[in-house]
Image (tube, rainbow, N blue to C red):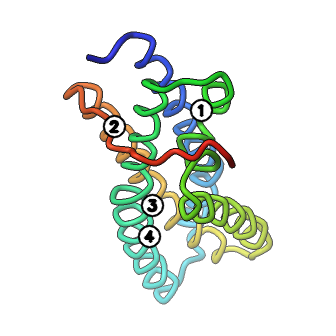
Amino acid sequence: MRTGRELIIASWGIAGVIALVSRALISLTPIALETIRSGQLRTWHWVVLVGWVVTNAYAEGLVGFHRKFSPRTVDRALYLGRNPTWGRVLLAPAFCMGLFHAPRKVRIVSRSMVVGIILLVVTVRHLAQPWRGIIDAGVVVGLALGLASLIYLFVRAVVTKREPVLHQVESQS
């Protein structure tokens, strides 16, 4: 049986992750749309754009988010709801993303992804159009699918009252 407190704590963790993904979507979508609407895309640009969008939909949206990140994030949010500590609750979004108090492999992957994303953002910002917009279009599609996956899996877990399956939470970061 899930209590209101457990649901609020789990929701706070998921809401923080949703906010981070949404912020990226809000920033990147206008750049991607500007490139598409600008009329500067030649046939080969369109081929690259479509290929990149499909690749990101599969690799980032389906494999990265729906099969890996979103289930783990939802599971950690549910776990946190049942096993709160002040520190974990305060930093719930980071906890849910596996940045601390997670198995070593999860911490390494999560932290590496954060650093990698930051480096990619810095690099892509320096690209000229239409390449920046093409890359951003693929990222927007992947993030949008990932966001939908995260929301869907969390709502499904809450509605079905699914218990977390997370077995390992390390007490040290």
Tag in front: 1 or 2: 2
Question: Is label 4 in a helix, a strand or a loop?
Answer: helix
- Near mark 3 (Cα within 10 A), the count class, few <14, some 14-19 or many ≥20, is many
Tag in front: 4 or 2: 2
Badge 3 amino acid = Gly
In screen coordinates, is 120 left or right of 51? right
Badge 4 amino acid = Asn
* Residue position for label 2: 164
* Residue position for label 3: 142
**C-beta proximity under 8 Å, tags 3 and 4:** yes
Cα distance between the residues tagged 3 and 1: 24 Å
**C-beta proximity under 8 Å, tags 1 and 4:** no
- Near mark 2 (Cα within 10 A), the count class, few <14, some 14-19 or many ≥20, is some
Cα distance between the residues tagged 4 and 2: 29 Å
Badge 2 amino acid = Pro
Image coords of residue 130 (percent x, y): 64, 75
Could you tell which of marks 4 and 2 lies nearer the N-terminus? Answer: 4
Residue at the spot 61% in from the left edge and 68% down from the top edge: 133
Residue at the spot 35% in from the left edge and 70% down from the top edge: 58
